[in-house]
Amino acid sequence: MKIFCVGKNYVAHVEEMKSQVPQSPVIFMKPETAQLSSGKTFYLPDFSNNIHYEAELVIKINKGGKSIRKKDAAGFIHGVTLGIDFTARDIQQECKAKGYPWELAKSFDYSAAIGEFVYMSLDEIMQSRFVSKKNGIVVQKGDPSLMIFDIPSIISFISHRFTIKKGDLIFTGTPKGVGPVQSGDILELYLNDKKLLITDIK
Ligand code: MG
């Protein structure tokens, strides 16, 4: 099973990161060992002093495919949930400055919190809204229709380069409002007011 992630996929988040809107999707991957199920504790790793949450819509792939056309992409969606792309922001800044890959900042153990999956059509996903709360306060609001690269484009782009398989996951990028977590924080993610993910930070 592979976990694909899209970076810089909402304009407002690109702006808050003082970055530039990409011309083609920014893709990175996390290994299977990055998974953290909803309800489990996220333990702050000792190699970073600045772990950020990034709440994202996550797509699960239902069958294998390669070079999928955009118009066929909806048929490869098995379900949807919300996830947190935990990011060691201090390490990512260092990687960016040196031109190094992002894995050390993005792909460490338990860096991909994954909620409970629900089943929605592509149209329903595009019309959905999500929010993330830190300690009960809304910190991020997500509107999938504002993605720079929409879900069919992402599935098509990824599958032209990597064969996708049943069970693969795609984190589709975070909206604005990312920020740090500290021990004692609780993160909760809601899709259309339904809570799909909770994790506490220690
Ligand atoms: Mg992200």
Image (tube, grey):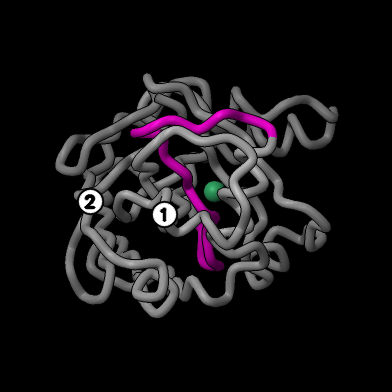
Q: Quadrant of the N terminus?
A: top left
Q: Quadrant of the C terminus?
A: top left
Query: Which percent across, then down, holds residue 81?
Result: 30, 54
| Amino acid at the residue labelled 2 | Phe
Residue at the extreme bottom: 127
Principal secondary structure, stretch drawn in magenta? loop
Q: Residue at x 67, y 56 (%)?
A: 8
Residue 2 in the image: above or below residue 179: above
Q: In this figure, what is the number of numbered marks?
A: 2
Determine contact: label 1, label 2, CB under 8 Å.
no
Q: Residue at x 40, y 75 (%)?
A: 123
Disc 1: which residue? 75
Magenta part of the chain:
161-178
In front here: 112 or 166? 166
Residue 57, by quadrant, is bottom left
Query: Which percent across, then down, holds residue 142?
Result: 45, 71
Name the secondary structure under disc 1. Answer: helix
In front here: 162 or 71? 71
Query: Which percent across, then down, holds residue 127?
Result: 40, 80
Q: Residue at x 34, y 42 (%)?
A: 62
Q: Is residue 92 left or right of residue 183?
A: right
Does the magenta portion include 68?
no
Given this view, does label 1 or label 2 mark the residue nearer the observer? 1
Query: Which percent across, then down, holds residue 40?
Result: 18, 36
CB of mark 2 near ligand 1 (< 8 Å): no
Q: Residue at x 56, y 31 (%)?
A: 29
Disc 2: which residue? 117
Name the secondary structure under disc 2. Answer: loop
Q: Is residue 20 left or right of residue 130?
A: right
Q: Which mark is residue 62?
A: none
| Amino acid at the residue labelled 1 | Gly
